[in-house]
Amino acid sequence: MPHSDQAYDKDVPVIDMRDISIGFTARAGSVIHVLKNINLTVRRGESIGLVGESGSGKSTLALAAMGYLKHGLQLLSGQVTFQGQDMFSLDTKELVAIRGGKLGLVPQNSGQSLTPTLRIGRQLEEALRLHSGLPQEEHRARAIDLLDQVRLPDPGAIITRFPHELSGGQQQRVAIAMALAGDPDALLLDEPTTGLDVTTQIYILDLLSELAQRRNMAMVYVSHDLGVIARVCKRVLVMLRGEVVNEGTVETVLTNPDNDYTQQLLDAIPRLDGPRMPSALDGALSDASEPRLLTVSNLSLSHARPALLDRVMGRPAPRNTVECVDFAIRPGETLGLVGESGSGKSTILKSLAGLLPPVSGSVVLADGTKLPPRVRSRGPNQLRQIQLIFQNPDESLNPRHTVAQSLAQPLMLYKGMKGGALRRRSIEMLEQVRLGESYLERLPRQLSGGEKQRVAIARAFAADPDLVLCDEITSALDVSVQAAVMDLMADLRTRLGTAYIFVSHDLAVVRSLSDRVAVLRHGQICEIGETDDVYDAPSHPYTRMLLDAVLEPRPDKGSPALNRRGTSSDQCS
Amino acid sequence: MLRMFLRRTLLGLATVAIVSVIIFAGIELLPGDACTAFLEREAKGQVLENCREELGLNRPALTRYLEWAGNAMRGDFGMSANGQESIAGLVGARLGNSLLLAVCALMIGVPLAIILGLFAGLRRDRPIDLIISTGAIFAMTIPEFVSATVLILVFSAWLGWLPGIVLTAAEAPVREFFPEILLPMIVLSMVMTAHILRMVRSSVIEVMNSDYIQMATLKGVGYGRIVFLHALPNALLPAINVVALTIAWLLGGVVVVEVVFNFPGMGRMMIDAISDRDLPVVQALALIIASAYVLVNLSADLLTMFANPRLRTLYTRG
């Protein structure tokens, strides 16, 4: 068995994956494919992009290159070789020497990929100790040097920090530094710049390209963002549901995609200046004279019940999170709620969902009845009318319930369905969110983030609601999934005439979906109006400030000049 | 950090103060008082009046509460109703014995729980996990008096290896409790090991599935180092509070075990005091046990805060 430090031929591929199929065994005993017959060859100095939505199997493929499969997955067929070694037949010791050394990984979720109880310095030095061959006393200096290479401000201070003390962008750069510590011949990058602001992203991409060139390093670049791929890769594979649907040089795939799906992917990213998504039909706009679905008047909400100690000491109660808010929703209308974090957007949703009784104010339904403040005092029909979709599908789906069980609850509760009708309706619901029958028996951990959120959406729509409250439903998702989820929401609205209240801090997302927008600041609405009016001619200075702070994901649109040190937007205060 | 510490300590003291009022009120509501208990049949007419006059029991409840609470703060719990001995002296020795038993049980139970929990978590759903987890459920569900009796039967009556009950006097020095203390210690550590083990196991499973363990694996970190450096410190954080609850339980609530083994600790003293209607002693013990609960939980919260970088830096670095 040849070892990694042995000389190898230049033309031999660094990573060679042949006829890879990976899958898992579902509860029913049938094997479900995550990847089907994939071939991938990467040579020295070559950069290959893997593009696709989450759930397309691109991350699984990248991890398989390291001989690693997530819990429950199995290699059904095929062979993975790295520098001539079969990764799935190596023993632990040989694997450990390659992983993080000659074959580095920048993980998808760097915030959760750093051990919370270890300081950054220790984690970097660990990588150096395992793979660099440097003497112990040089580790610290080298760690600082690596952090400096990825353009982290004040690396000397960073190494004494714990992961949670860094911002998302800083964590991402630490992860890149860690991958470079082993002096890799090949680097697998799983959405490496997703958490970064635009200027840092460009810097990091250029840095990676330069490193790859200088060190003749092979790179496999996993991303949903074709723009990112175009900047660093020569060749690209477009993946859909575990299969490669389009393959070729970046130029041909981007300029002349011979596949509908690739074209869709190109169109998916929302832009701040594009007024709305093509799928959001203008006909969905409701007439002003139409009856109101829901009228909120004078709503004040407070989160913090005064602490016992404060009440004993007679300190004044904290101020309300939301103060005297008025708005109304028409049937089928989408109202966007935007504002900084802490402005009370989600608090309003919580209260409408009956989870937080208001301090004062009322919510009146279409038929003139008052909506009871607490969820337990609401009747079944009132409960059915209003459904909530949470930000994080990981936490809102019961990990021990299959998709079928999750969907069955609203169907049984509100529709009294059972047996065959229940199953048929569940499949219908899944098809509406573009998942199929094969998903029924899966558990949440067998789904990707985007698929989970779709199940959560299907669950909300299973109740056949009049109003769906969406609490940052796309912010835990990557951009391609976000586009797909928004597209889905727009589609469901057109077909079912459901009204949404859409909470997001992402102004572009809100614009693409909303008919009207309310801008919240410190718990008060400072501007509300038709989406285009608010975006094109904001009347409140705060709205203008919010709009100015948005970074456009395009280099030509006046992105701030690159500065050598981190930008203010990803500093941890 | 300091602010946090002071806040929690203040809250703890407030809890103890409220508990002391409840205890005092509870004892006050019971029919009879120290004099009726002491005089028994002669407790009537002038004799009773004289006794109450002498002990100051005729004064208003508030005055007596303040006096009791004030003295208790200085460690003076007054005299027991029966033997006219200082309660502080009586309790002191018993408290020491309970602590001794608790410390011995902890020294066995906690490391054992961590090791077994770790094993079970790492070998999830394999035979060793099934054996450990099932064993833990048994240890938790079998009542202590049953396991105590079985152990006495096996190790004392049949094998004759260990003494079955404790005959040493409450005031005896520590070394005289060995080997008598071994059986009660084993019974206690069985139950607490089971509780802590289950917590450690589930937390190990959760941590081993996390992204950072996957990352460490793909960084080429060896398995042993992953387990002990990356996983275990994170997995133990949630266990700290379970350990604290167990310690509090050991200090106050091990009545059954102490009675079965005739161990002269706080639990048995409490039972004796109740059956003797020795109200001042009951009152003092209740307060001490409550304070121990508060103290142990406070320490656990502070320790969790200190061991978890997320919480620690929240209070130190603003």
Image (cartoon, coloured by chain):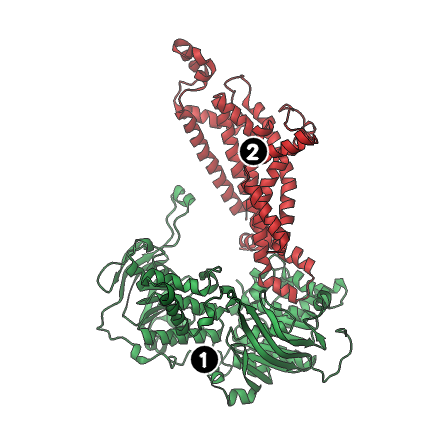
Give the SS element for disc 1.
Answer: loop
Are dots 1 and 2 on a single chain? no
Helix, strand or loop status at disc 2: helix
Q: Position of residue A380 (x, y in %)?
A: 30, 58
- Report the side of A115 relative to A436 (left or right): right
Mark on residue B145?
A: 2
How many marks on residues? 2
Q: Which residue is found at the position 51% from the left and 73% from the top?
A: A54
Q: Amino acid at mark 2?
A: Phe
Return the x and y of residue B251 as percentages of the image width and height. Answer: 56, 35
The residue most toward the top is B46
CA–CA distance in space, label 1 to label 2: 68 Å
Residue A573 visible in the shown view: yes
Q: Which residue is mark 1?
A: A268
Q: Chain of mark 1?
A: A
Q: In the image shown, does A249 or A85 lie closer to the viewer? A: A85
Colour applied to chain B: red
| Badge nearest the viewer, 1 or 2 | 2
| Residue A172 image point, x, y percent | 58, 69
Name the residue rendered at 42%, 32% in the picture.
B22
Q: Residue at x 42, y 62 (%)?
A: A406
Q: Is residue B243 visible?
A: no
Q: Chain of mark 2?
A: B
Q: Nearer the viewer, residue A156 or A96?
A: A96
Q: Residues within 10 Å of mark 1 (few under 14, many from 20)?
A: some
Instruction: Describe residue B224's horizontal placement relative to residue B262 as left or right.
Output: right
Q: Choose between A290 and A562: the one closer to the eye.
A: A290
Identify the image quadrant of residue A81.
bottom right
Task: Please name the amino acid that badge 1 sits on.
Answer: Ala
Q: Which chain is green?
A: A
Q: Which mark is residue A214?
A: none
Give above or below for B79 relative to A417.
above
